[in-house]
Amino acid sequence: MKNLLCAALFCSAVLITGQGKKFYEKGEVDFKQRVERINMRFENNLPFVKVTIRNKTYTFLFDSGAPTVISQAIFRELNLKKKYRRSVGDSNKNTQEQIFTELPEMKIDQVTFRNTGAVVLDLNADELRCLHVDGIIGANQMAGLVWRLNYAENQLEVAKDISGFDLRGFDLVIPFGTSIQKTPLITIRMFDKDLPFTFDTGFSGRLELTEAEFNPGKVQRSVRTSGTHSTGAFGTAKPSEGYIFRAQAIGIGNSVFKEEIVSTGSMNLIGNEFFRDFTCIMDWKSRRIYMKRIRTVPAVLESFGFSYRFLESKPVVAYVIGEDESLIRNGDIILAINGISLEHLDQDQVCHYFLHRIESNQRVINIKIDRGGKVFDYQIERKAYLN
């Protein structure tokens, strides 16, 4: 979690729940090879693929925590028909009414999907516009197939059944159920309880637990947090008090993981910071996830103690770790980091600094902030928490 406070702004970028079971079962898929390799780019802890619709190329997020989504621009360009409108909610429990439609055909390399149910969303809101995504390959589109992901090598493969993959070394086996939209729901044993978690490739973080399920009496090491560190389809989560803590032992599938770092939030999620240490195979037919460890990296939390998001093109501190000890406070406007001015930014500059944080990979930063009209200069060292 070295980049927790930067990457967390992407967490659960779009996770939609809607009604209509039949809608999410629409669609057919066709490919000729036993296993098809698909282009994938793993960046900012999120997986992206290139898709072709009517000979035009688009960028989609590969997100098991969401249904298939297309942008409003694609909906208009293709002159698609509205099937109906229905209220949907994002990962921060914000809700809006959206259009549901059907996408006649989409190609991902040599794999062709037809008549796929899709939700139409505005993907240019807030920080989401900086991801430059045109849609989402969602769980309803993945269902019925077998997918293998290896983020370390930017590999994504798909097969029609599990026989297309060699399971040797895939020692971690996780059964899963599904939501209406086909999102995998796994069980994680924590605090002596079996808790449902969303297996979410659209979540850039590691593990997130709802604040209601957090049990401080069973945690030896934790740090308080305040503010908001996630952006959903319809805006950010409401600011709140929370924790980041070490779980002494959690059970996932047939294995036990010790000293994992977990943050509290609005949903139970497991995401890409955990997955990137493994090759993962998701089999919707057997409802099993198979995972093979490819690297062992201890879970650590290193941070300057704050995170910021861009509001009206201004970087504003929105999340603080250990607020009592922090020099930086929620609501501070950042004027400069390491002498680089963050004032008077245009939209391209906002997106550049949102995706490529000045403080990334730095051990010490000099930061200038505006707090209620008064300017302060601080030198802050990156700190290790929960050791």
Image: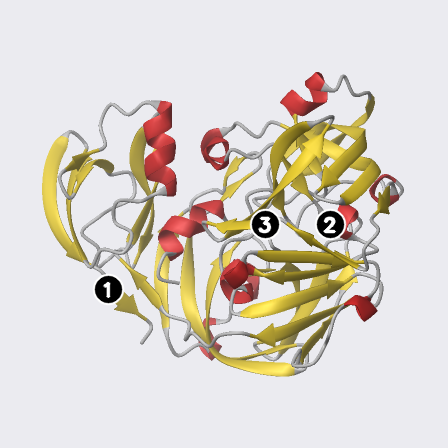
Scheme of colours in the image: secondary structure
Mark 1: amino acid:
Lys
Q: Position of residue 348 (x, y in %)?
A: 37, 27
In front of the other: 185 or 214: 185
Q: Residue at x 65, y 81 (%)?
A: 169
In the displayed structure, 271 sits above or below 20; it is: below
Residue 59 spot, x, y in % from top left? 59, 36
From the viewer's perspective, tell me whether residue 283 is left or right of residue 128: right
In the picture, the quarter occupied by the C terminus is bottom left
Q: Quick check: can you spot residue 207?
A: no
Q: Nearer the viewer, residue 60 or 314?
A: 60
Callout 3: 10 Å neighbours few (<14), some, many (20+)?
many
Q: Secondary structure at mark 3?
A: loop
Residue 100 to residue 330: above or below: above
Please provide percent x and percent y for residue 275: 56, 65
Q: Are marks 2 and 1 in contact (CB under 8 Å)?
A: no
Nearer mark to the viewer, of 3 and 2: 3
Q: Marks 3 and 2, Cα distance to the nearest angstrom?
A: 17 Å
Which quarter of the figure has residue 250? bottom right
Q: Are marks 3 and 1 in contact (CB under 8 Å)?
A: no
In the rendered image, which residue does mark 3 sit on?
40
Q: Which residue in the structure is indicated by mark 1?
A: 383
Q: Earlier in the sequence, mark 2 or mark 1?
A: 2
Residue 307's label in the rendered image is none
Q: Which residue is mark 2?
A: 139
Q: Identify the amino acid type marked 2.
A: Ala
